[in-house]
Amino acid sequence: MNYSQLRDLIFRKKSFLCVGLDSDLNKIPKHLLNTEDPVFEFNKAIIDATIDYCVAYKPNLAFYESRGIKGLQSLEKTMHYLENFKDEVFTIADAKRGDIGNTSENYALSVFDKKSSGFDFDAVTVAPYMGEDSVKPFMQFENKWVILLALTSNKGSLDFQHLRNTENNNRLFETVLQQSFTWGGNEENMMFVIGATQAAMLTEVRKIVPKHFLLVPGVGAQGGSLSEVAKYGMTADCGLLVNSSRGIIFASSAMDFADVARLEAKKLQIEMEQLLNEIL
């Protein structure tokens, strides 16, 4: 999915919601544990319940890889099911890969080359701190996106991301944003992760990347404010994918979990529609 397709999808659905499929086997409703593949059945129910209100799904690969072959099979089934909605959703492999050389090349194949791996995600999250040769292999695929970690919402982000360069006084996250341009990154093939709890920093981010899409986790269970994110980060093309995981998929652990997830997704979509109307 390219830039214009993603933008058009957002305005057609009146939503910039991304649903994180952090499908922890220990947290899904107990009645699903008797099924052949509980994680896939959970994901399918969540997708069916929320597809009308979101534009993206983001499986966190750790929750699948940690279960070995069974987990990867659940992921494969989930991605195969999402192919039924190919024009309706943008898919993100939340993998946070970061290595160099042919290791990075194979990481790219694992998420983008369906013939090789069975997976055909639209985008993958990448850690940029090993530099250009850890990122560029992911950028060799047409209509695929690299989503660079830039300014995250976790407490530990203060350890490194705000450190200043003594020569130019740039913070490390600002250097990441600026350096990405030299790797061939532009608004057509690169996004950045900016945590919702860092919303006040979005003004600084937008000074460097005024047109790029931003993937913004941390709304909902982590306490980030959707209105604040939109205030400081929204562009004329929206420019945002706001992720909610636990606040939607684990809103209920009872038999009605999918219905409750749908209601939570709808609440966010209604708020997003109002915010989008302000830029139309």
Image (cartoon, rainbow, N blue to C red):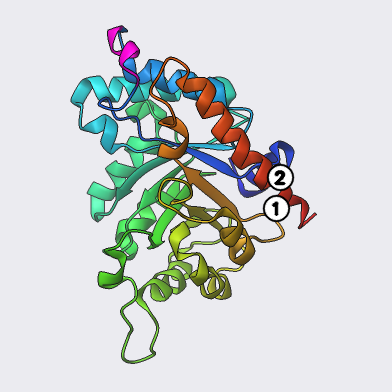
Q: Quadrant of residue 128?
A: bottom left
| Residue in view at x 23 percent, y 47 percent | 103
Q: Residue furthest bottom?
A: 167
Magenta span of residues: 29-34
Task: Tell me the chief SS of the magenta region.
Answer: helix
Q: Three-letter amino acid code at disc 1?
A: Leu
**Residue nearest the observer in this picture, 113 or 217:** 217
- Residue occupying image coordinates x 44% and y 61%: 197
**Residue lying furthest right:** 280
Q: Is residue 15 left or right of residue 76?
A: right
Answer whether residue 83 is visible to the viewer in this image: no
Horizontally, is 63 left or right of 259 in the view? left
Task: Estimate the spatial distance between the alpha carbons at disc 2 and disc 1, rounded to whole Å.
Answer: 5 Å
Quadrant in the picture for residue 236: bottom right
Vertical comparison of 151 with 77: above or below: below
Residue 224 vs 51, above or below: the answer is below
In the picture, measured across the screen, residue 28 lies left or right of residue 51, that is left
Name the residue that disc number 2 marks: 273
Helix, strand, or loop for circle 1? Answer: helix
Q: What label does residue 275 carry, if any?
A: 1
Q: State the count of labels.
A: 2
Image quarter in which the N terminus is found: top right
Q: Position of residue 10 (x, y in %)?
A: 67, 43
Viewer-proximal residue among 104 and 152: 152
